[in-house]
Amino acid sequence: MDYKNAGVDIEAGYKSVELMKKYVKETMRPEVLGGIGGFSGAFSLEKIKNMEKPTLVSGTDGVGTKIKLAFLMDKHDTVGIDCVAMCVNDIACAGGEPLFFLDYIACGKNEPEKIATIVKGVAEGCKQCGAALIGGETAEHPGLMPEDEYDLAGFAVGVVDEKDLITGNDLKAGDVLIGIASSGVHSNGFSLVRKVFEMTKESLDTYYDELGKTLGEALLEPTRIYVRALKEIRDAGVQVKGCSHITGGGFYENIPRMLPDGVKAVVKKDSYEVPAIFKLLQEKGGIEAQMMYNTYNMGLGMIVAVDAADVDKTMKAIVAAGENCYVVGDIQDGEKGVTLC
């Protein structure tokens, strides 16, 4: 009897590390000390010592049950982007710059090529946000997970000068809300998605004219990463007064998180075109509009609040970062919360 007979293939683990090294290398930053394979990742803080009050910001998250679609479609090169996005978008919401990222993959059986493909997506997400992939763990769990399944989660650390933290404390009536377009469902609400649509290869391979692609392609579209957009806004000299990453809980849960007491956010639903995937989901599932906005991003992955005088400058910066955006509402006096009209 040995470890391999018990279900854990150490040699497969070694092979996974070798296969993923080329992807990890592409994410390196000058601050990274050492290489992959150590017991910990080392990252120099030399470059941030000139900040007045350097403040660490962190985020951790997973991809959720969206992973199930990757299994069904046997497509594993994009869920890593989702994992990074869910973590670093939260950091960007606070005004932070992501510095480094670590991933955790739990699997029933270590298939080196599949693991390397997952990490390829993680590395792509890190490249999009400028974070270094400085470590991770692949854990084989025979008997706990089916051999052909895995779960993916991650952890990111960023930095911001305390004076540049986005807190929402300075929000006032008259400030304008700008929504940055999402790429689709992102990584939230897939438990409901999987109830609405039949989760079979045939169903996911069905082409929809309104989507311009198959259902599976639309649903597996990776989460947008908004780090560059927030940086472009900051570099344009604009103060982002409030910021909401629209994830699980949709508009109703996430927008109030950026508000101080005494003001409310008013969002106009007709200020932009809701993407076809949400219309299809609502129609097929018979889902009430309020539940849609309480579950999904409805086409807006990030909402920023800026002074009315900074709207044009902000939108130009967002477009310069390669994103689409819309003026979607404003801040008004009232009880803390969000009104959709």
Image (cartoon, rainbow, N blue to C red):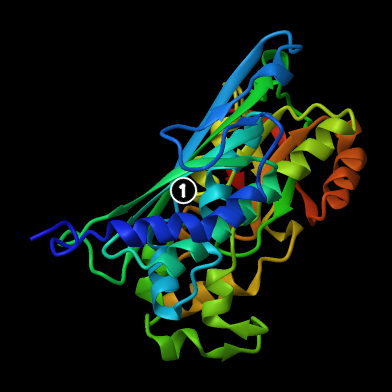
Q: Going by the image, does 313 lie left or right of 224?
A: right
**Image location of residue 52, percent across then percent down:** 73, 8
Q: Quadrant of the N terminus?
A: bottom left
Mark 1 residue type: Gly
**Image location of residue 279, percent across then percent down:** 58, 73
Q: How many marks?
A: 1
The image quadrant that residue 307 belongs to is top right
Between 1 and 262, the one lying in front of the other is 1
Up-down relation of residue 297 to residue 154 (above or below): below
Between 288 and 55, the one lying in front of the other is 55
The image quadrant that residue 54 belongs to is top right
**Image location of residue 179, percent across then percent down:** 72, 49
Q: Can residue 286 be seen in this snapshot?
A: no
**Image location of residue 71, percent across then percent down:** 39, 73
Identify the residue at horizontal 17%, vertical 56% (top origin). 3
Up-down relation of residue 3 to residue 206 (above or below): above
Identify the residue at horizontal 90%, vertical 46% (top origin). 316
Q: Mark 1 points at which residue?
A: 249
Between 251 and 187, the one lying in front of the other is 187
The image quadrant that residue 74 belongs to is bottom left
Query: SS class of the residue under badge 1?
Result: loop
Q: Can residue 318 be seen in this snapshot?
A: yes
Up-down relation of residue 321 to residue 116 (above or below): above
**Within 10 angstroms of label 1, few (less than 14), some, or many (20 or more) residues?**
some
